[in-house]
Image (cartoon, rainbow, N blue to C red):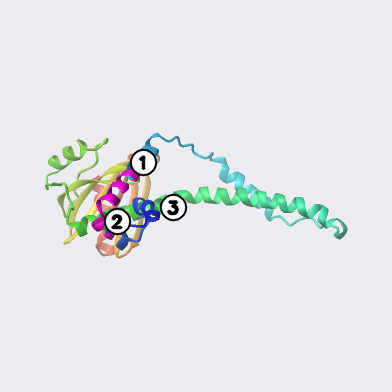
């Protein structure tokens, strides 16, 4: 199966519709697979070697102050001078609008990242279920699973199944441009997957979401980003999230 070259970047970034993403993953010909691997390697190189600069925290306040200033009623202008004053005001307003739009886009980037990562997690889970390749190491013993993961990752992930859940094993997958740990559980007859990788920053509470019939949860604790995904019903899933957090 070939794919429009213009869609390759969207496929690599997990931006295609889930059905199309899985179709390409399953049926792509060798040339397409080689190009996908080249793009993934390029993305990894950029993420690891490019320099990033955080926007100053004061930017939000500056933009809000600018918007408040723009919202104030303008002083009355005498009709005979309207063109002499209107053009400079218009130019200043457009410049302010451009800055405001850029700032709004910057403020929305974290949410856009969350949405992208959520799509990547869901695609990873669906791909594993459809392919039947849920685990790379099949074991219910965390003393077996944890060293297996630690030997293939640059961090040591938590591997403690919560009470009432059966540990099926684990695998290494690729989310947000880096290898991550995926713990595979069976809970109430359903498969659930717990994703984890290290991040900088403060702890974050649980955020729940639903997408395409799946339940998802994300949180950050002790320098580790967590995602949990399953097709459990909302009540059972919320209980599982609570138990997984307690086990960690």
Determine the residue positioned at 29% across, 56% down: 123
Q: Split into 4 quadrants, where in the image is the C terminus?
A: top left
Query: SS for tag 3?
Result: helix
Quarter assignment of residue 147: top left
Q: Left of 187 or right of it: where is 242?
A: right
- Which SS class for mark 2? helix
Tags 3 and 2 touching, CB below 8 Å: no
Q: Identify the secondary structure beneath mark 1.
A: helix
Residue at which label 3 appears: 112
Q: CA distance from mark 2 to mark 1?
A: 21 Å
Sequence-first disc among 3 and 2? 3
Q: Is residue 229 left or right of residue 161?
A: right
Residue bearing the label numbered 1: 42
| Residues at marks 3 and 2, CA–CA distance in whole angstroms | 17 Å
Q: Main secondary structure of the magenta part?
A: helix
The answer to whether residue 223 is visible is yes
Is residue 245 among the parts visible in the rendering?
no
- Tell us which disc is closer to us: 3 or 2: 2
Kindly identify which numbered label has been placed on residue 123. Answer: 2
**Is disc 3 surrounded by few (<14), some (14 to 19) or many (20+) residues within 10 Å?**
few
Mark 2 vs mark 1, foreground winner is: 1
Q: Residue at x 30, y 63 (%)?
A: 19
Label located before the other in sequence (2 or 1): 1
């Amino acid at each position: 199966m070939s794919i429009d070259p213009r869609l390759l970047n969207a496929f690599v970034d997990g931006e295609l519709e889930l059905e199309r993403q899985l179709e390409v993953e399953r049926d792509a010909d060798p040339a397409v697979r080689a190009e996908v691997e080249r793009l993934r390697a390029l993305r990894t190189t950029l993420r690891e070697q490019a320099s990033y600069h955080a926007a100053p925290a004061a930017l939000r306040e500056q933009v809000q102050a600018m918007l408040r200033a723009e919202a104030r009623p303008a002083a009355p202008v005498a009709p005979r001078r309207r063109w002499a004053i209107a053009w400079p005001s218009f130019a200043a307003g457009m410049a302010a609008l451009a800055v405001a739009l850029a700032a709004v886009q910057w403020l929305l980037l974290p949410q856009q990242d969350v949405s992208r990562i959520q799509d990547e997690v869901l695609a990873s889970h669906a791909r594993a279920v459809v392919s039947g390749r849920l685990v790379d190491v099949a074991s219910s013993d965390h003393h077996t699973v944890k060293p297996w993961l630690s030997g293939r990752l640059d961090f040591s992930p938590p591997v403690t199944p919560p009470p009432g859940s059966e540990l099926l094993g684990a695998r290494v997958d690729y989310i947000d441009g880096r290898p991550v740990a995926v713990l595979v559980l069976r809970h109430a007859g359903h498969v659930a997957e717990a994703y984890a990788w290290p991040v900088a920053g403060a702890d974050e509470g649980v955020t729940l979401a639903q997408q395409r019939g799946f339940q998802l949860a994300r949180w950050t604790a002790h320098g580790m980003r967590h995602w949990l995904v399953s097709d459990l019903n909302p009540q059972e899933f919320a209980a599982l999230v609570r138990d997984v957090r307690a086990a960690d």
